[in-house]
């Protein structure tokens, strides 16, 4: 049975969206419900990469079953380009339109349903998407790549045995849980800029970011209003203990072997506990002399240098279903969106605070660090915490190895869905790299030779790897 992760805001009663208790809806149930209520519009929101293929499947099913209602596409993993190239060609009965976020959906739906606007809107959208498809296929032809062997020859070069200092050993090896962390301890670490993006509030230079957005002539007043409302709800959540923050951290012996990171049972490093697979840059860029993979940031096994890797999973979403239900019972969409936005901010704040604790005490490789919150948000510290599904490691399936090592479902009550989304949704996970050589980068597009090599290393069929890595394939699979 195929599924799609959906988190759409109710725009009209005829817009199909899931119950708050589940982030996944089967395709057949979405379409059955659409027929049952006579939906004017169907909206699909994808949170992680597998949703992209599922959206294509839903579009094909809508075409096969003769639907003639507009299809809205949105969510964190989607893009207008993917909609134009992969989804819109599969559904010709009505417009298929990418919507950047829920706040813009009302305008789009109004244009799609207005008798005086819908034909011109649909024609303009189809023309734009046709142009985008032409640009997409032209860009694939223009891109230049290195072979995987060439890219590996340009890996980051570190003489691990002769570095001025050896990798720092963490204060403990294994797992530790940090549950029911006081929410008030997280507030100071909140980055408010993404919060305003949820509400599509963007100030103009020099008032783009928080707190200067309040001085913006266009959005300043509205930004202040939603911020004040957020403070009231945040106090309500903290005082009433309506959300719980849990987390788990693990530090383990590790060394790199090629593009992989071997994780060991203990300091003897004779028994491999897991292998973390990484992806390497292949695009040919004039300004770039290296082709990075995350394994470059861990001492090689051949060097004989003992190194370590960390990982974590945190959530501030325990209790979120009940909180959201309280707003749904009052038909309060504003309160529901506000609660979800604050849950996300608290989870990210927990990740930020925990990383500070890791650097200064738990791992302790930067014990003298003295940075304020602004510096933390600007990533002025040593080390990185990349997450599967993000530019440095676009493969969500690596979460399976992380969860095996962290035991996050039992120790922190954070589960992985069959699509490898984290539940509760207000959760953050990632790896910790401590060495000063570590830096964030984007893998970018990759070629078939690396996909085949990666599939072999992971023991997965090439087609399945292509499905998970669809957004970064440098060829048309």
Image (cartoon, helix red, strand yellow):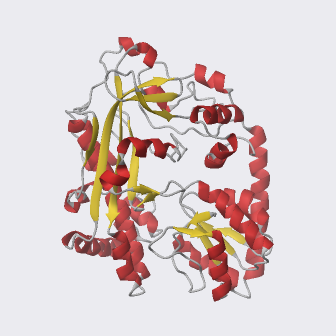
Closest to the observer, 299 or 113:
299
The answer to which image quadrant residue 302 occupies is top left
Residue 211 in sight here = no
Residue 196, image x and y in percent? Answer: 41, 65
Q: Is 63 above or below relative to 78?
A: below
Q: Residue furthest top?
A: 162
The answer to which image quadrant residue 415 occupies is bottom left
Please count the marks in the image.
0
Closest to the observer, 422 or 124:
422
Q: Is 185 above or below relative to 290?
A: below
Relative placement, left or right, of 288 versus 402 is: right
Residue 286 in sight here = yes
Closest to the observer, 19 or 87:
19
Q: Residue furthest front?
A: 271
Q: Is 167 above or below relative to 358?
A: above
Residue 186, image x and y in percent? Answer: 24, 57
Relative placement, left or right, of 476 versus 329 is: right
Residue at x-position 23% and y-position 38%: 362
Closest to the observer, 463 or 126:
463
Residue at x-position 60% and y-position 64%: 3
Position of the C terminus, as image quadrant, is: top right
Position of the N terminus, as image quadrant, is: bottom right
Residue 288, image x and y in percent? Answer: 57, 28
The answer to which image quadrant residue 404 occupies is top left
Residue at x-position 20% and y-position 33%: 367
Residue at x-position 69% and y-position 80%: 112
């Amino acid at each position: 049975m195929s599924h799609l992760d959906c988190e759409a805001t109710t725009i009209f009663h005829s817009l199909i969206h899931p119950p708050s208790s589940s982030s996944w809806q089967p395709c057949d149930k979405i379409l059955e419900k659409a027929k049952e209520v006579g939906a004017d519009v169907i909206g699909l929101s994808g949170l992680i990469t597998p949703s992209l293929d599922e959206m294509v499947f839903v579009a094909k099913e809508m075409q096969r079953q003769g639907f003639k209602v507009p299809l809205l596409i949105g969510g964190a993993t989607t893009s207008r380009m993917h909609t134009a190239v992969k989804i819109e060609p599969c559904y010709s009965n009505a417009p298929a339109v990418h919507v950047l976020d829920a706040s813009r959906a009302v305008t789009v739906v109004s244009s799609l349903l207005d008798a005086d606007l819908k034909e011109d809107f649909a024609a303009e959208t189809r023309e734009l998407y046709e142009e985008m498809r032409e640009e997409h296929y032209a860009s694939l032809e223009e891109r230049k790549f290195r072979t995987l062997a060439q890219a590996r020859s340009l890996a980051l070069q570190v003489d691990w045995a002769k570095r001025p200092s050896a990798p720092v050993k963490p204060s403990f090896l294994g797992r530790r849980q940090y549950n029911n962390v006081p929410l008030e301890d997280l507030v100071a670490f909140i980055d408010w800029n993404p919060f305003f993006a949820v509400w599509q509030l963007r100030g103009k230079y020099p008032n783009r970011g928080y707190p200067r957005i309040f001085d913006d002539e266009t959005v300043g007043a509205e930004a202040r209003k939603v911020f004040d409302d957020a403070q009231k709800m945040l106090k309500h959540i903290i005082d009433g203990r309506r959300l719980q923050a849990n987390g788990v951290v693990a530090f383990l012996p590790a060394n790199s072997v090629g593009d992989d990171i071997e994780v060991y049972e203990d300091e003897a490093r004779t028994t491999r506990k897991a292998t973390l697979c990484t992806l390497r840059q292949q695009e040919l860029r004039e300004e770039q002399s290296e082709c990075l993979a995350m394994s470059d940031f861990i001492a090689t096994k051949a060097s004989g240098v003992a190194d370590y890797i960390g990982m974590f999973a945190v959530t501030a979403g325990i209790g979120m279903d009940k909180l959201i239900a309280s707003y749904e019972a009052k038909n309060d969409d504003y309160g529901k969106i506000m609660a979800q936005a604050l849950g996300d901010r608290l989870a990210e704040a927990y990740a930020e605070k925990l990383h500070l604790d890791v650097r200064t005490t738990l791992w302790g490789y930067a014990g003298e660090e003295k940075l304020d919150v602004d510096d933390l948000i600007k990533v002025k510290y040593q080390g990185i915490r990349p997450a599967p599904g993000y530019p440095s490691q676009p493969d969500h399936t690596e979460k399976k190895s992380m969860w095996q090592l962290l035991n996050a479902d039992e120790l922190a009550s954070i589960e992985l869905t069959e699509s490898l989304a984290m539940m509760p949704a207000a959760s953050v996970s990632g790896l910790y790299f401590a060495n000063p050589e570590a830096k964030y980068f984007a893998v970018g597009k990759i070629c078939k030779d690396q996909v085949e090599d990666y599939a072999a290393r992971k023991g997965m069929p090439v087609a399945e790897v292509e499905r998970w890595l669809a957004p970064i394939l440098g060829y048309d699979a």
